[in-house]
Image (tube, helix red, strand yellow):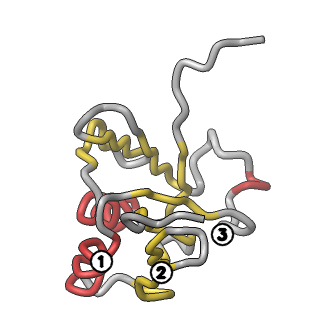
Amino acid sequence: MSTINRLMTNICSDNLAESRDFYTKLFDFKVEFDTDWFVHLIAKDKKLELGIISRTSEIVPSDFQNNPQGFYVTFVVDDADEVFKIATLEKFEIISEPKDTFYGQRRLLLKDPNGALVDVSSPIKGFEF
């Protein structure tokens, strides 16, 4: 069995700059690498990474260059309401405003510029099953 050294999600995009700005305005990512075909974002604590790649890049197989389906990306943050305020100010597409869930999370749903569903959740303090 191989040891996992790192896990990074890559999102295919038609507009790298718009995607980069979406994720850096909402979360504590900084731009580590930025070209015309790939943007690498890394959290300020260097523990989390997100890649944004041109949908039509030669390294993305043609069968996977379609709009995203059947998955979503979850970011667990300290305060989902704070992210909601930023998303509102930036006029990002809001699918569902923050609300408390039955499983102890305050959850906000956004749509990123590429059509990917983005779940922003924060634990409800004092919640117990």
Q: How many marks?
A: 3
Q: Residue at x 57, y 57 (%)?
A: 55
**Picture quadrant where residue 70 is located:** bottom right
Residue identifier under label 2: 100
State the residue position of label 1: 81
> Would you call the spot at circle 2 few (<14 residues within 10 Å), some (14-19), or many (20 or more)?
some
Q: CA distance from mark 1 to mark 2?
A: 11 Å
Residue at 60 percent of width and 65 percent of height: 129
Residue 74, given in percent of the width and then of the height, sits at 52, 59
Q: Amino acid at mark 2?
A: Asp
Would you name the residue on which mark 3 appears?
Answer: 67
- What's the amino acid at mark 1? Asp
Residue 72 placement: quadrant: bottom right
Q: Position of residue 123 (x, y in %)?
A: 42, 62
Viewed as shown, does residue 97 lie left or right of 65? left
Q: Mark 3 or mark 2: name the one nearer the start of the chain.
A: 3
* 28 relative position to 12: left or right: left
* Residue 5 position within the rendered picture, expressed as x and y whole percent measured from the top left: 54, 18
- The CA span between labels 3 and 1 is 28 Å
Q: Quadrant of residue 2?
A: top right
